[in-house]
Image (tube, helix red, strand yellow):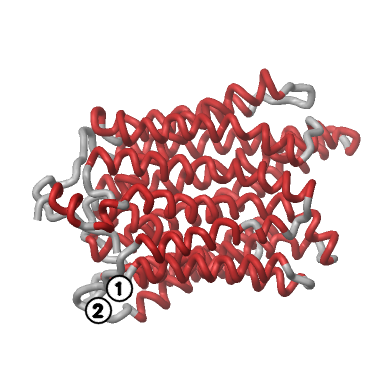
Amino acid sequence: MSSSHTTTSDPHHARRWLILAVIGIAQLMVVLDATIVNIALPSAQEALGFSDANRQWVVTAYALAFGSLLLLGGRIGDLIGRKRVFVVGLIGFAVASALGGAAQSFGMLVFARALQGAFGALLAPAALSLLTTTFTDPAERGRAFGVFGAIAGSGAAIGLLLGGVLTEYLSWRWCLYVNLLFAIPAALGGLALLHEQAHPDKPRIDIPGTLTSGLGLFALVFGFAKAESDGWGAGITIGFLVAAVVLLGAFVALQTRVANPLLPLHVVKDRDRGGAYIAMGITGAGMFGVFLFLTYYLQQTLGFSPVETGLAFLPLSFAIMLTATMATAKLMPRFGHKALVVPGMAMSAIAMAWLAQVGVDSSYATHVLPPLVLMGLGLGLVFAPGMSIATVGVAKTEAGIASAMVNTTQQVGGSIGTALLSTLFASAVSGYIADNGPQAAEAAAVHGYTTAFWWSAGIFALGTILSALLMTSGVKELDPHAEPVLAH
């Protein structure tokens, strides 16, 4: 079957740009949720009366469910059909968001967040794999992944603005209710536009692989969460991180022995695909320094309101959109992915080092805005090509698990970044106060922020080196003789 024949005769493929709009809405909702809830936390804490120590669980509950179930969610989409999983994920996320918005207790809010994470683990891989299997023409694939990468990269910054507006002018509850405005139209669009196509062989779920990967990823994310709150030397931190290493090691060993592995290892052994997964994970870790500590700096040091803070991040979003849409549509077909990802990582490292020069009396226009724009330009060169190359060339029956690996590496990278940079921040602040006295609290906080920025710069520098070593040069294209794969 030729590509042109498929494009003209199949109504599913003919509506591929509408499908992209639906997938984009779903992706924006998932990415927004990473930051929009953080803005609402102080107000939610005041309304529901939970302690500072418990506050982290509103974030951690989502991360634990999402991170530990992603591989299973991706594989379920491969096996039973991505349309079904996509729509179920959207509806479930909407219900969980409504439950969280209506929460009258801390426990109910945490349960709703965990439920959001579980349905997000179904939704996120399904969205990316639908994109992968819908757009098979190299030129169109480039444009589609540019749009998707722009949403993935800029959504967190948009979430800060939207969260600030909703919290300041409506209520913290609307930071959860707003997901219904994304999920319901996307679910209706998915039902109308997508065709279902289940796995032709109906293989069984890899139960041992599911258990070891799910428990291993849970232990890994939980271990990093405890490192942030209890310290790296705490027994519970060490115990969970050791358990994660053992369980994930057992998972890898099992994948070489079972007939239908949860994660076929050839998916990650490809140099470019494996390099893309590592790049996405490192980006997840390094970006944490921007979104958390720069938010604190803008609000606590420069005195920005939540809405002003959100507006301050918009140049980052616009810069990401600019390079992400150009990267896969125009630059990658000409120069290849490595020629974009490596400079993008380097630009991000330089931007973080530049941001580390801020002080107590710095201004936004001269000290924050320029590195923020440079950061956005660099991230756009990483996100869209990284997501595209992480999923190109996989069999249609493995697109879901390949997509799940993108989300898994980002989630694990974010957890590592959260724990590592928070610990370094706290150590820098306490050390500065010990040397200069409690009257230097404001300067100590800025010293903590700049320490985190320097370490983020180091993380991106590591990403630059690893991407240069792992990825191959040249243009990696879809096989023009392969039968096109339609979204299912």
User: Which amino acid is tagged 2?
Assistant: Pro
| Residue 211 shown left or right of residue 12 in the figure | right
Q: Quadrant of residue 334?
A: top left
Viewer can see residue 235: no
Q: Is residue 374 positioned above or below 289 on the image?
A: above
Q: Which residue is mark 2?
A: 203
Mark 2 vs 1: CB contact within 8 A: yes
Viewer can see residue 86: yes
Q: What residue appears at the point 71 percent right and 65 percent down from the top-left corner?
A: 101
Q: Is residue 407 positioned above or below 295 on the image?
A: below
Which of disc 1 and disc 2 is earlier in sequence? 1
Q: Quadrant of the N terminus?
A: bottom left
| Residue 235 shown left or right of residue 55 in the figure | left
Secondary element type, mark 1: helix
Residue 375 pos. (x, y %): 52, 30
Residue 79's mark? 1
Front one among 65 and 53? 65
Residue 275's mark? none
